[in-house]
Image: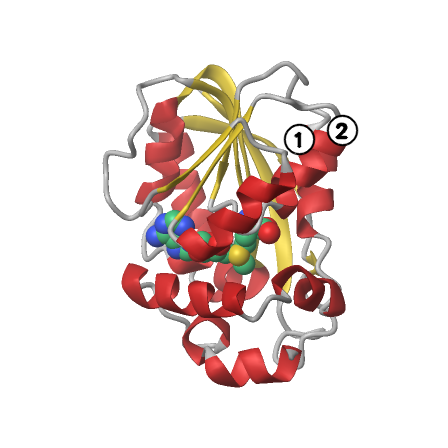
Amino acid sequence: MAKDIIDETPEIWGKEYSTDSSTVERDYDTFADTGSYDETFDEWGYVGPQTAAAIAGNYVATDSRLLDAACGSGLTGTALKNLGYDNIEGIDISSHLLELAGKTGAYRKVQQVDMQQFPLPFDDGEFDAVNFIGALTYFETNEILRELCRIVRSGGHIVFSQRDDIMRDGNYDRKLDELEADGTWARVFGTEPMPYLPNHPEYGEEIKVQYFVYRVV
Ligand SMILES: C[S@@+](CC[C@H](N)C(=O)[O-])C[C@H]1O[C@@H](n2cnc3c(N)ncnc32)[C@H](O)[C@@H]1O
């Protein structure tokens, strides 16, 4: 199955990945329809959700109101729930993945949102923290990060990951610094590149991931 889904949905797996919302929605719906989305990620060795939840645990109180942005099938919400978080909402563009997320029991609410359409349907400072894991790849600019800062209260946190090849080749650190320079957020934690999908034939050792925590100013 893992091999089939890579061939079937090259625009979400290829090096030339798509940042077009409708393409991403179509391909993640297709992936969800295989019935083995979580198993496939498990096969690829994906531990992003558990890693991100453990990192969040160092900065975010368990009674926080959390948004799991681009929650997919609910892996991150489930990892957070296992650490004691019980006030989590999930949003994603793939309704088929949201159906799976809803079934995990980790979320108070899930809703379909295209995160490329601003403003996101939330008030200023509505959340204590946002987790945004394994999804920044699908966004052309860093404007999504600024928008996530808008919906988190001052002093709250954004926990996210980014592929290390994009950090490097896309000079992404500069984009993160821009938001620090204009007083939007401040970095409180960042990792070196870590394994991302170690058993995925096109990622393997080549594409790694970095995790970050920023405090909203
Ligand atoms: C690799 S999955 C990661 C899912 C989850 N965060 C996790 O770590 O298991 C990437 C997710 O980003 C979502 N996504 C991509 N572009 C999006 C957009 N414009 N709006 C909302 N969700 C989007 C996809 O539908 C998919 O669920």
N-term-proximal mark, 2 vs 1: 1
> Is there any visible trace of residue 161 in the rendered image?
no
Colouring convention used in this rendered image of the protein: secondary structure
Q: Is residue 20 above or below residue 199?
A: above
Of the pair 80 and 149, the residue shown nearer to us: 80
Please report the residue visible at 40 percent of the width from the left and 59 percent of the height from the top.
138
Neighbour tally class for label 2: few under 14, some 14-19, many 20 plus, Cα within 10 Å: some
Please report the residue visible at 58 percent of the width from the left and 17 percent of the height from the top.
64
Residue 70 screen position, x and y as percent: 47, 46
In which quarter of the view is residue 170 placed?
bottom left
Please report the residue visible at 58 percent of the width from the left and 60 percent of the height from the top.
164
The mark closer to the camera, 2 or 1, is 2
| Residue at the spot of label 2 | 83
In which quarter of the view is residue 105 placed?
top right
Residue 115 screen position, x and y as percent: 33, 45
Residue 133 screen position, x and y as percent: 56, 47
Neighbour tally class for label 1: few under 14, some 14-19, many 20 plus, Cα within 10 Å: many
